[in-house]
Amino acid sequence: MIHAKSASIALSALAALGLAQAASAQEVKLTPEQIESNITADHEVDGKWFTKEDIPTFKVQEDGTVDWYTFSGFRRYNSECFVCHGPDGQGSTYAPALAKSMLRLDYYDVLGIVAGGKQQGNLVMPSFGDNKNVMCYLDDIYVYLKAMGMDAIPRGRPAKRADKPDAYKEQEDACMG
Ligand code: HEC
């Protein structure tokens, strides 16, 4: 488990340095145009929601039911990203608040950062490009964090979720091999 190992190295490096940099949890202000192109669910394909510009996004029904991808993203985030980025994508002393990052960053930039990693001084975001448990579920994690960043869902495990779409299962099997 490459990522778990890098996480513990990163965290012990952090402890050694006594680094206590505040997480960048600053507010992200979006224009109505940005919300429409990057956030607002416009159409659905087999249970997966997209904006007008075909960017994956979340969908929360009036009764609070979240789409399957958002729910799945919650679980994947908690197994793969939580250790550094903190509960509910709210950030830690070590890594940024992804719930806000996802509102600010372009979708394709997110894919690039997660696949290739990122380093700024002592801060190391590992590369997950060869980790199927991340790469096969990256859209899930991405839409979950956007929902969190927009305060569209409460913190913690989503209480109600849509069923797993058949198309999701097929894609998952194909991706995981
Ligand atoms: C080992 C700790 C660690 C783990 C695990 C980790 N990250 Fe990171 N991540 C970081 C650090 C540290 C940064 C800041 C890097 C920098 O600024 O150069 C970062 C930055 C990012 C950024 C850029 C954020 C921004 O505002 O620029 C994204 C996106 C990101 N991580 C996504 C993820 C996702 C998705 C996961 C889980 C699949 C994950 N990270 C797991 C440590 C981690």
Image (spheres, rainbow, N blue to C red):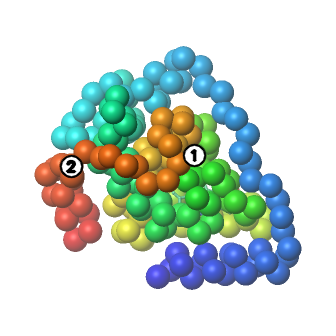
Where's residue 164, x and y in %? 21, 52
Kindly identify the amino acid type of the residue bearing the numbered disc 1: Ala
Where is mark 2, residue-wise? 163
Q: Nearer the viewer, mark 2 or mark 1?
A: 2
Callout 1: helix, strand or loop? Answer: helix
Where is mark 1, residue-wise? 99
Would residue 151 be seen by someone viewing this image from the given angle? Answer: yes
Where's residue 44, x and y in %? 25, 33
Vertical side of 94 occupied by 5: above or below: below
Answer left or right for 57 relative to 164: right
Answer left or right for 119 relative to 109: right
Where's residue 121, x and y in %? 79, 64
Vertical side of 89 occupied by 6: above or below: below
Q: Residues within 10 Å of mark 1 (few under 14, many from 20)?
A: many
Q: CA distance from mark 2 to mark 1?
A: 24 Å
Residue behind label 2 places its C-beta within 8 angstroms of ligand 1: no
Where's residue 10, x and y in %? 68, 75
